[in-house]
């Protein structure tokens, strides 16, 4: 366990999958959670659950790619809790298809949410962290940000961008004792992967009679030395460490939680 008592953490995309597990874990460690999600109802539901566990939190409906929304989220957090010690940029979206078939919007969507959204949240929150000379930023990238993959080119490009942004920010913010790291999940069964499996099923006749779960598990077995998927809690464990006092000398890193699928 890490002691996050007295810390305030903004977790974007906290309404589902990996973000939800991160918010619950940081809350268990003692942090007050600001659940920021496009799906306001899902964020509200999570905060009710957190309050039911006797912890503090606030739900905010936000589109991370909107400067206005991000500024409002940070203002609401400051008005309610007067500080932000932790930012986890987890909100993300995919885009499937061969690059030669993609429209400009297919390309723009992951760039807008995954990369621009991470930039906007880092920029706005860092301005609140700098005067306090302390902060922890964790960006949820992907192993697709380390090694290009067919059919998810725009998503890969956005996640490579997140890793570059993480390194640049770690250099800019280190003097203020703010650490910036990325966590790169491998294969986690969430609504995002369900959409990907649906796309494979629709586009590959050999997969037409397979269940979505089978498509996912076969993929995991074929590319992962440990031969099993990761859970949202696996990802949350590393995030909890990276935002703790113990990780104060780690910055600019992009760490895979992927069963060994990618080894750099
Ligand atoms: P998910 O679809 O279950 O959850 C994504 C959440 O982000 C949802 O609650 C959604 O409402 C929210 N969101 C989407 N667009 C948003 C926006 N513009 N503003 C605010 N919130 C928005 O997905 P997940 O699998 O939990 O993915 C979480 C993160 O992990 C993403 O960044 C994803 O790229 C990354 N990731 C996932 C996997 C995986 O295997 N699932 C692997 C590598 C990386």
Image (cartoon, helix red, strand yellow):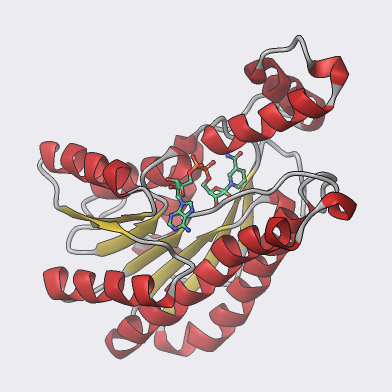
User: What residue is at 35 percent from the left and 61 percent from the top?
Assistant: 62
Q: Is residue 37 left or right of residue 55?
A: right
In-front residue for pair 175/155: 155
The quadrant in which the N terminus is found is top left
User: What residue is at 23 percent from the left and 76 percent from the top?
Assistant: 75
Percent x, y of residue 34: 26, 58
Task: Look at the picture and state if 216 lies above or below 83.
Answer: above
In-front residue for pair 82/203: 203
Q: Is residue 10 left or right of residue 252?
A: left
Residue ranking furthest to the right: 100
Residue 230 seen from this side = yes
Q: Is residue 116 left or right of residue 136?
A: right
Residue ranking furthest to the top: 209
Residue 74 sits in quarter: bottom left
Percent x, y of residue 6: 17, 63
In-front residue for pair 183/110: 110
Task: Look at the picture and state if 249 lies above or below 96.
Answer: below
Residue 250 seen from this side = no
The quadrant in which the C terminus is found is bottom right
User: What residue is at 21 percent from the left and 52 percent from the top?
Assistant: 30
Task: Look at the picture and state if 171 lies above or below 251.
Answer: below
Percent x, y of residue 117: 51, 68
Percent x, y of residue 69: 35, 70
Residue 229 sits in quarter: top right
Residue 133 sits in quarter: bottom left
Task: Look at the picture and state if 161 lies above or below 18.
Answer: below
């Amino acid at each position: 366990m890490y002691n996050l008592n007295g810390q305030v953490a903004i977790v974007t995309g906290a309404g589902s999958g990996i973000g939800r597990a991160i918010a619950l874990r940081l809350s268990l460690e003692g942090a007050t959670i600001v659940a920021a999600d496009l799906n306001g109802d899902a964020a509200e539901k999570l905060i009710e659950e957190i309050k039911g566990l006797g912890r503090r939190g606030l739900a905010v409906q936000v589109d991370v790619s909107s400067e206005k929304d991000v500024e409002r989220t940070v203002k609401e957090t400051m008005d309610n809790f007067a500080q932000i010690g932790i930012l986890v940029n987890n909100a993300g979206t995919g885009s499937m298809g061969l690059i030669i078939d993609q429209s400009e919007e297919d390309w723009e969507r992951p760039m807008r949410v995954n990369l621009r959204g991470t930039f906007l949240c880092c920029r706005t929150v860092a301005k609140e962290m700098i005067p306090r000379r302390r902060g922890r930023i964790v960006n949820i990238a992907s192993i697709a940000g380390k090694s290009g993959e067919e059919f998810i080119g725009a998503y890969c490009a956005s996640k490579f961008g997140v890793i570059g942004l993480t390194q640049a920010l770690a250099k800019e913010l280190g003097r203020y004792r703010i650490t910036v790291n990325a966590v790169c999940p491998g294969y986690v069964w969430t609504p995002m992967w369900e959409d990907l499996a649906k796309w494979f099923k629709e586009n590959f006749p050999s997969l037409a009679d397979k269940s979505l779960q089978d498509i996912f598990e076969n993929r995991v077995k074929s590319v992962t030395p440990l031969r099993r998927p990761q859970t949202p809690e696996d990802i949350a464990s590393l995030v909890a460490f990276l935002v703790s006092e113990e990780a104060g000398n780690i910055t600019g890193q992009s760490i895979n939680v992927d069963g060994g699928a990618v080894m750099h």
